[in-house]
Amino acid sequence: MDTSALAISVARTWDTSIVPQLVEYIRIPAKSPHFDPRWEANGHIERAIRLAETWVLQQPVRGLALEIVRLPGRTPVLYFDVPGTGQHTVLLYGHLDKQPEMTGWREGLGPWQPALEDCKLYGRGGADDGYAVFASLAAIGALQAQGTAHARCVGLIETCEESGSYDLPAYLDLLAPRMGAVDFVVGLDSGCGDYERLWATTSLRGLAGGTLSVDVLTEGVHSGDASGIVPSSFRIARAILDRLEDSATGRVLPAAFHAPIPEERVRQAKAAAAIMGESTVRKYPFADRTAPMIADHAEALLNRTWRPALSVTGADGFPAIADAGNVLRPRSLLKLSLRLPPPVDGGDAMRALRSLLESDPPHGATVRFEGDEGATGWNAPPTAPWLEQVLEDASRAFYGKPAAAMGEGGTIPFMAMLGKHFPQAQFLITGVLGPKSNAHGPNEFLHIPYATKLTACVAAVLAAHAARTG
C-alpha cells in the first residue's frame, strides 16, 4: 500500500465531497427519537438517511450494495455490503441521529447552522458522528483505487444511537445472518485525547437515566402561608439524591454502581495522561475559578471512564426566574444521568436506582423514578498483536506520532450488543471527539484535518486485516 498516495486520495475526497455533504447534513435537525417523539412525521431523520444514501450510491466502490432497512415503528438503518477478498468480514458502524440543540452557542454558530472556521466544521452531529458513513466508504474507495485488498465490509449506520440504540437489537437480529461471521469491528463514534495521533478506545461506560419526580401538593400555594408546614419538593429531591451521591465530593455511594478497575486500564490511563498532560482536566470550559474535582491526571481519566458519576441534565416544575412568584411549587422533576463502569449491567443498575430513589420517601411525598435510558457499557477484549502493530504503524504514517489508547466516558450501547453477537471479533473503536469538540453541548465541531487522517488510518487497518486473514 502506498501510504502517501492513500493520504492524498483521502484528503481529496474529504475536501471535495465529504465536507460539502456534512455541511448539508448539519442543516438537518435530525434529533434522535427520544428528543423528537414525532420523528417520523417531522421527516428529519428520513432526510438525513436519504442524504447519506444518495452520497454512498455515487461512490466509485466496486460491488457496493446499499439499502435503507426499515422495521415497522422503528427508526431506519442504512446497510451497505462491499465484497472483498478472503472469507472474513469487517463491520463498520456509525449513526446519523443527533442530540438536541442545547443553549450557549456563540455568536455566528448554531446547531443547524454549519460554519467552517480554522479547519473546524461547527454544527450539531458532524463529529458525533455523521462523518462516520462518509469516512467508512472513503477508506474503502481509497484502497480500491490503488488496488489494495480489503476483506468484505458491511456497514450499519443507525438513527437511534443518541436515544440508547433501543431500536438496534431488532436490526441486529434481522441483519446478523446476512453479515455472517464478523471478525473485526470498526466503530467511528468515540473520542481522542488530542488531535496529534490515532487513539483507540478500550472501554465505554454504561448509563442509567430517567426522571425523578417529587409531588407534595396538587397545586401551588402561597409560600408565606405554607412554608414550614408543607415540605419543599426540591428539598425532598435533594435528600433523595443524597442517597445516591455525596454532594460534597461527587462520589456515587452505593456499591452496586461500582466495579473493580482492571490493572491494564490503570496502566493505559497513566500513559494517556502523560500524553495529554494538563489538557486532561483543562480541556473543559470552566467558568471563572471553577476547579476540577481531581488534580491527578490519571485518576481524572479513571473518574470519567471507570467510575460512576451522576449528572442532573434537566429540570421541570420550575418557572423561569422572571416568572417566579412567592409560590411553594407542587412538584419538582429532575432528569438524572448516572454513568456506570463498563462491567455494570445497565438493566440491574436501573432496577437498583429505582428502588433506591423511590423507597421510604421523606414526609410520605409521592416519589417516582421513570427510567428511560439503560445501557451496559463495554470493555474491549485483549488487542491482538497484529492490530496493535497496525495501529502503531498507521498513527506514525499519517500523524507522525505513536498511537495511544484510553477508555471513554460516553456510552455506545451498540458495542455491548456486538460483543454478544460476535464474541470472537477484534474491535477498533475510535473517533474525532477531542479537546473542546463538545459533542452534545454548544459549539460542537469536527476537526477536519484529524478526521481526514483518521480515515486514512482506517484504510490502513482494513488493508492489514485483509493481508492477515486473506
Image (spheres, helix red, strand yellow):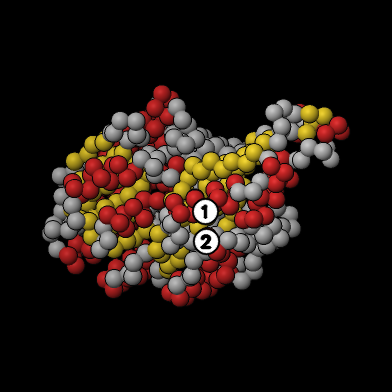
Quadrant of the image occupied by residue 149: bottom left
Residue 146 point in image, percent of width and height: 20, 55
Identify which residue, 237 or 147, lies in the foreground. Answer: 237
In this rendering, the answer to whether 220 lies above or below 380 is above
The quadrant of the image that shows the N terminus is bottom left
Residue position for label 2: 256
Calculate the distance from the C-alpha at mark 1 to the C-alpha at mark 2: 8 Å
Amino acid type, mark 2: Ala
Q: Residue at x 54, y 37 (%)?
A: 101
Residue 119 visible in the current orientation: no
Residue 211 point in image, percent of width and height: 57, 41
- Chain-order first, disc 1 or disc 2: 2
Residue 256 point in image, percent of width and height: 52, 61
Dot 1: element: helix
Q: Residue at x 50, y 57 (%)?
A: 340
Amino acid type, mark 1: Ala
Name the mark on residue 200. Answer: none
Looking at the image, residue 347 sits to the left or right of residue 436; the answer is left
Identify which residue, 263 or 279, lies in the foreground. Answer: 263
Looking at the image, residue 355 sits to the left or right of residue 398; the answer is right
Identify which residue, 356 or 104, lies in the foreground. Answer: 356
Dot 2: element: helix
Residue reaching furthest right? 224
In this rendering, the answer to whether 181 lies above or below 393 is above
Residue position for label 1: 352
Quadrant of the image occupied by residue 167: top left
Q: Are marks 1 and 2 in contact (CB under 8 Å)?
A: yes
In this rendering, the answer to whether 205 lies above or below 21 is below
Mark 2, Cα crowd under 10 Å, few <14 / some 14-19 / many 20+, is some
